[in-house]
């Protein structure tokens, strides 16, 4: 195989042996983050606490369903659960985005039966009430966008249509039904390979972002159907104009146009989601894994967090155990270099929402345990240097990781106002935990939620670095991260403010002073530090 970020051929499985298979899973070192979609199955406080305890880092609110009032009630319960568990849990608003759907049926019918080989006309008159001969389509430019021989997929691909002819004047497309199918009203439609003339943000999306997301101090936006870099810039302007400039944008790549413009999108976005559901409708399913590896690798080199999503443990919506193929899918995403993996219906609607998070966490931990992180660091660094000369911030981050590797440091401590330094350190994939200290609660949630291997703590200020250093070393000793005499690397700035990181220090944990505190204050809500624990 070819390693995730290097061109050097490597035989897979070099760090796996029989002991690896037999040894019990240790969850304390899990680095890959877990996104959980909230829904009726898991949205009570006690259930949300179970998700947090099992390993949820980011709570996804799917705005394809529900209204502002319902989502706000769920958000309030989530924040109560996070407070109860003393955890930083990031909030993600997933936009509905533009969509193409079939219409309604005549005579009150809720479904129609279609037979293979018959003709079916699609009309852009969305007010038309359809039957098994003719149905409406919400995309007004359908007849001018597709051509003879092209495929149209309906209801997640359960119905395949082939275009026979197009009548632009009438706004109609004649298709041939390729398989027997029963479909209901308002089913989604995909046009593989077609550049669809629809805005990335609908009026609903803008309202959701401005009047719910920004208003409720969310942390992340998953922008659906991003197709070009300008789509991201439009969203960023809306955020900036409405007081939400601190919210990070994760661009969902869901069609071929987005894939073709991926490198441009990557330059302007804050993160990437490999949205394999719709992507698998837009490109051949046997190509999806290639697109996944390509997108993850490029995001790793760019130092942008990447989330792998859709059907990861799909069978656990109804079953208490996943299939072996599903566990392999999660593990392979970790091997590919993903920063996070996502659960959708498994947590939103599944009976086994907690078990789904637990098995995902265990699978991620197992995959990570069989990776040589020192070689991974060198692989990332070499791949980056082949693309561009490292800027100062990345060079400092790379040096901090190299210093940690060379000294056998037990942790890397990052003082960060904006989270940028933390992102640069996480990019180089150190094998030891990264503890981010920041005065911003939002930055803490973003770092803990999206950056591989990062934990986050909120502090009052970063100005007195000497005092912070002493506090951090004490906390590392008390929490068991490092023993007296063991090194910890600290990357910080000699001045305060965004962009001021200019110093790497190696500190050694000291023996406790008689009468000093022995309880980790990182775990205490009333303490100087608030957040999640390292161990």
Image (cartoon, grey):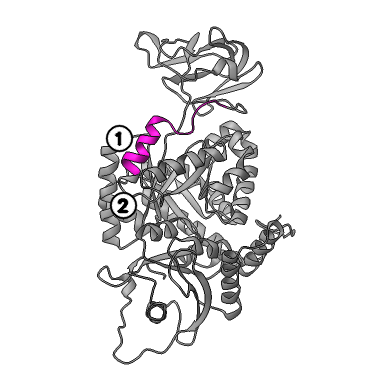
Query: x, y (%) of residue 231?
Result: 51, 38
Within 10 Å of disc 2 (Cα), the crowding (few <14, some 14-19, many 20+) is: many
380 or 20, nearer to the observer: 380
449 and 500: which one is in front?
Answer: 500
Q: Which residue is mark 2?
A: 48
Describe residue 342's horizontal placement relative to residue 393 as left or right.
left
Closer to the N terminus: mark 2 or mark 1?
2
Q: What span is colored magenta in the figure?
A: 196-213
Measured as percent of width and height from the top left, residue 76 is found at 26, 49
On the image, the x and y values in percent for residue 444 come to 39, 61
Q: Which mark is residue 228?
A: none
Magenta stretch holds residue 280: no
Quarter of the view holding residue 458:
bottom left
In the picture, which quadrant includes the N terminus?
Answer: bottom right
* Count of all numbered marks drawn on residues in the image: 2
Element type at marker 2? helix
Residue 449 falls left or right of residue 108: right
Q: Residue at x 65, y 56 (%)?
A: 4
Question: In this view of the protein, can residue 75 be seen by the observer?
Answer: yes
Tag 2 and tag 1, C-beta contact below 8 Å: no
Taking the image as drawn, is residue 39 in sight? no
Name the residue at 58% across, 47% down: 266
Residue at which label 1 appears: 67
- Dot 1: element: loop
Dot 1, how many residues are within 10 Å of its Cα: few (below 14), some (14-19), or many (20+)? few
């Amino acid at each position: 195989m070819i390693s995730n970020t290097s061109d050097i051929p490597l035989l897979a499985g070099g760090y796996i042996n029989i002991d690896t298979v037999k040894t019990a899973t240790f969850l304390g070192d899990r680095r890959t983050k877990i996104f959980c979609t909230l829904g009726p199955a898991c949205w009570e406080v006690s259930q949300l606490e179970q998700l947090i305890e099992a390993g949820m880092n980011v709570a996804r609110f799917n705005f394809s369903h529900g209204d502002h009032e319902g989502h706000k009630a769920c958000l309030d319960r989530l924040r109560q659960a996070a407070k109860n568990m003393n955890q930083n849990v990031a909030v993600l608003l997933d936009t509905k985005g533009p969509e193409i759907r079939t219409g309604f049926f005549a005579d009150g019918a809720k479904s129609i039966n279609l037979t293979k080989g018959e003709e079916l006309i699609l009309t852009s008159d969305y007010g038309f009430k359809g039957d098994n001969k003719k149905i409406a389509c919400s995309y007004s430019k359908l007849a001018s966008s597709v051509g003879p021989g092209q495929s149209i997929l309906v209801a997640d691909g359960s119905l395949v249509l082939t275009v026979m002819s197009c009548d632009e004047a009438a706004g109609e497309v004649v298709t041939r039904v390729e398989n027997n199918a029963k479909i209901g009203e308002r089913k989604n439609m995909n046009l593989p390979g077609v550049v669809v003339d629809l805005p990335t943000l609908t009026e609903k999306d803008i309202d959701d972002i401005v009047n719910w997301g920004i208003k409720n101090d969310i942390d992340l936006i998953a922008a659906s159907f991003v197709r070009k870099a300008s789509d991201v810039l439009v969203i960023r302007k809306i955020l900036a104009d409405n007081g939400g400039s601190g919210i990070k944008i994760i661009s969902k790549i869901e069609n071929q146009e987005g894939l073709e413009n991926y490198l441009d999108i990557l330059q302007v976005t804050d993160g990437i989601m490999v949205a394999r559901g719709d992507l698998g409708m837009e490109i051949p399913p046997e190509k999806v894994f290639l697109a996944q590896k390509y997108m993850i690798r490029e995001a790793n080199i760019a130092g942008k967090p990447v989330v792998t999503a859709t059907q990861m443990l799909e069978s656990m919506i109804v079953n208490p155990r996943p299939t072996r193929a599903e566990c392999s899918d999660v593990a392979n995403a970790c091997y590919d270099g993903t920063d996070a993996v996502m659960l959708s219906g498994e947590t939103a609607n599944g009976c086994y929402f907690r078990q789904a998070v637990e098995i995902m966490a265990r699978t991620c931990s197992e995959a990570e345990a069989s990776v040589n992180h020192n070689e991974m660091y060198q692989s990332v660094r070499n791949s980056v240097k082949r693309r561009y000369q490292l800027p100062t911030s990345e060079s400092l981050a790379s040096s901090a990781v190299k210093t940690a590797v060379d000294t056998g440091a037990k942790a890397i401590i990052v003082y960060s106002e904006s989270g940028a330094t933390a992102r640069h350190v996480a990019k180089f994939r150190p094998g030891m935990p990264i503890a981010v200290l920041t005065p911003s609660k939002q930055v803490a949630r973003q770092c803990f939620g999206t950056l591989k291997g990062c934990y986050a703590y909120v502090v009052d200020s970063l100005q007195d670095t000497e005092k912070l250093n002493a506090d951090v070393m004490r906390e590392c000793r008390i929490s068991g991260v490092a023993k007296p005499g063991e090194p910890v690397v600290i990357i910080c700035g000699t001045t305060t403010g965004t962009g001021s990181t200019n110093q790497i220090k190696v500190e050694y944990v000291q023996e406790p002073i008689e009468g000093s505190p022995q309880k980790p204050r990182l775990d205490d809500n009333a303490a100087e530090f608030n957040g999640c624990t390292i161990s």
